Amino acid sequence: MLWIDWRLAGKSTVRDLLFRFVLVSAASFAFLVLLLSGGPARFLASRYAITAVLRTTVSPGEGEGLAGKVAALPPVRAAVYKDPETAWREFLLAYPGLDSLRSTGGNPMPGYIEVRLRPERLTAADVELVTAALRSVSHVEVVLAGEARLPRLLLVKRYAAAVAWGAFGAFAAAFLAILVLQEKGRSVALAADFAFLEERVVPAGRLAASRSVAGALASLPLAAAGMLLSGAALRHLLLRYPSLEQLVGPPGDLLLPRTVLAAGGFVLCFAVLAAAASLLGFRAARAPRS
């Protein structure tokens, strides 16, 4: 009873599974991209920085030490110290033709620390935590955190994430509808076989349950293979095009425990989806037509 679809409709079952494999691979790839990128969070975090301008009396050693302490804060992804000479070169790149400013004296640019936050910690509370910690340090002259544009940035992050995950949810709903149609079509094709089994004291509920369990068990390796294929493809793209790390993240994040657990949860959810589609399709095929 568990493998009734394979025994009665092997060819159509294989065809449907191949089609599902293509869909679940595409869904797995989209899921991994959304999971690692946090929607727009990683891109926005790569564009946002907190700048702590240091006093002119701060030595390079003190600046490096302070940057190390800032990097240890939980919301911080990286904190890099830029000495006055580096700051001057960056100033000239941004505003060429102003070399004469230095001819009147020494280097007019102070050293500074550039702080980047973790994508998942790009929140108003975490920005306030980092800026408050920096402002309490005597070596810091001023902290620039873009307070004027920060609320708009966080609003964009929130709405863009909602749109991205909403689109993924719509794809999942369409996927479920396709699975239900597949199951309904197969149930209609096997209606005579089901009737034969029911006449021999095999209840319809047992038929539906057996097909549902079989669909879930067949979907587990299918979804796992699709997830592995998608992970390998995404890793290949990240290694081949390093610039994608600003959008998705480094290849190593694919092997983080939280990523592996999320991928496992996705595989189980797909199996549950397949089981539900089997039940819905079976019931729809047996519903009386008006």
Image (cartoon, grey):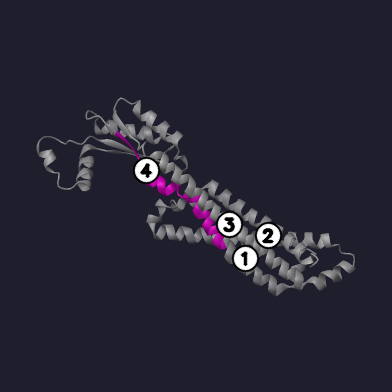
Q: Quadrant of residue 11?
A: bottom right
- Whether the residues at callouts 2 and 4 have beta carbons within 8 Å, the answer is no
Q: Which mark is residue 170?
A: 3
Query: Quick one: 235 or 137, which is closer to the camera?
Result: 137
Q: Which mark is residue 262?
A: none
* Sequence-wise first label, 4 or 3: 4
Mark 3: secondary structure? helix
The amino acid type of the residue labelled 3 equals: Ala
CA distance for labels 3 and 1:
17 Å
CA distance for labels 4 and 3:
30 Å
Residue designated by label 4 = 48
Residue designated by label 2 = 274
Magenta span: 25-52
> Where is residue 279 shown, x and y percent of the image?
74, 60
Residue designated by label 1 = 20
Q: Is residue 58 above or below residue 149?
A: above
Residue at image position (79%, 66%) is 286
Question: Of tags 2 and 4, which is closer to the observer?
Answer: 4
Left/right placement of residue 275 relative to residue 98 reads: right
Residue at image position (83%, 62%) is 204
Mark 2: secondary structure? helix
